[in-house]
Image (cartoon, rainbow, N blue to C red):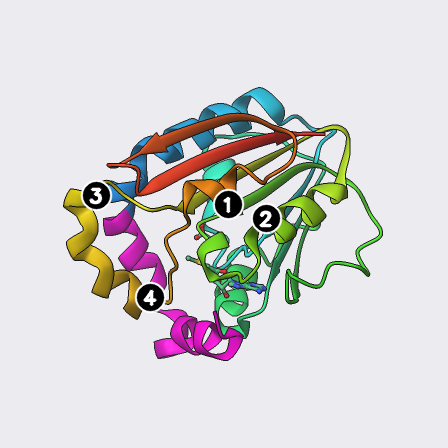
Amino acid sequence: MNNDNVKNLYAICSAKWYNPFMRVYNRLVLSRAENEMVVFLKNNLDETKTILELGCGTARNLEKIYSLDLKFKKYLGLDFTPDMLNIARNKFKKNSNVEFQEKDITKLDDVNEKFDIILCIVVLSHIKDRPDFVNKSQELLSNDGSYFLMMHTKPKWYINWLDPFFKFFKTNLIPGKEIQKFKNTIRMNKYSGNLITTVVIHK
Ligand SMILES: C[S@@+](CC[C@H](N)C(=O)[O-])C[C@H]1O[C@@H](n2cnc3c(N)ncnc32)[C@H](O)[C@@H]1O
């Protein structure tokens, strides 16, 4: 996937389309997978935990964490689209333990910190070498850390007619054989006719 095409997509209307669109898409497609994420967050977060979100976008998932009243020590959100980050930063200006950085998440060699929780939510379909990305990024987990991924995957045949929609959104539907290459997977679940897959990785 060409990075400039992805950035240009999310920069449309200064990214103002994204949150309203996701409210609808969430209801139609993501809600059951998101429920699993909520359980994951409730089971894993407390005031001692640090969070890294890869491809944080407009910080939709951090809003979720706050709405659930879950505590954490520190949150770092990385994304390469400035317009998405502007929206995220505006939401959390006053939160001193929240930081956003403009960064290509396929280039993480200069991140020297380890994190207790890593989140990567509906981002992987934009990345070229997914198994390599997942296996490298999980090196940023601290001992006993947990990584939660939600991704678009090859659906059952009756959803194939949605292909042009995903092409427009620069979204590659990930085949199962790629997911099998992710190291240290302890759980995988499929939702919405297999269109959405969640993976939990433990260090
Ligand atoms: C569908 S949005 C998901 C945003 C957020 N995770 C959420 O759940 O709302 C995909 C995000 O991934 C970001 N992204 C895609 N490829 C990236 C890369 N190589 N480096 C950094 N961010 C990337 C895009 O800029 C966009 O904000």
Quadrant (top left/top right/bottom left/bottom right) for the C terminus: top right
- Check if mark 1's residue and mark 3's residue have beta carbons within 8 Å: no
Q: Residue 46: which numbered mark, if any?
A: none
Query: Which residue bears the numbered disc 2?
Result: 131
Query: Which region is colored magenta?
Result: 1-25
Q: Position of residue 191 (x, y in %)?
A: 31, 33
Local crowd size for mark 2, using a 10 Å CA cut-off: few (<14), some (14–19), many (≥20): some
Residue 105 against residue 80 in the figure, above or below = above
Of pointers 1 and 3, the one earlier in the residue sequence: 3
Towards the viewer: 163 or 150? 163
- Residue 39 in picture, x, y percent from top left: 47, 23
Q: Earlier in the sequence, mark 3 or mark 2?
A: 3
Residue bearing the label numbered 3: 28
> Which residue bears the numbered disc 1?
178
> Disc 2 and disc 4: Cα gap in Å?
21 Å
Whether the residue carrying mark 2 lies under 8 Å from ligand 1 is answered with no
Q: Of the residues tagged 4 and 1, which is closer to the observer?
A: 1
The residue at the far right in this view is 112
Whether the residue under disc 1 has CB within 8 Å of ligand 1 = no
User: What is the CA distance from the residue labelled 4 to the residue labelled 1?
Assistant: 21 Å
The amino acid marked with disc number 1 is Glu
Query: Where does residue 195 sit, x and y in percent of width and height?
Result: 30, 43
User: Which residue matches tag 4?
Assistant: 169
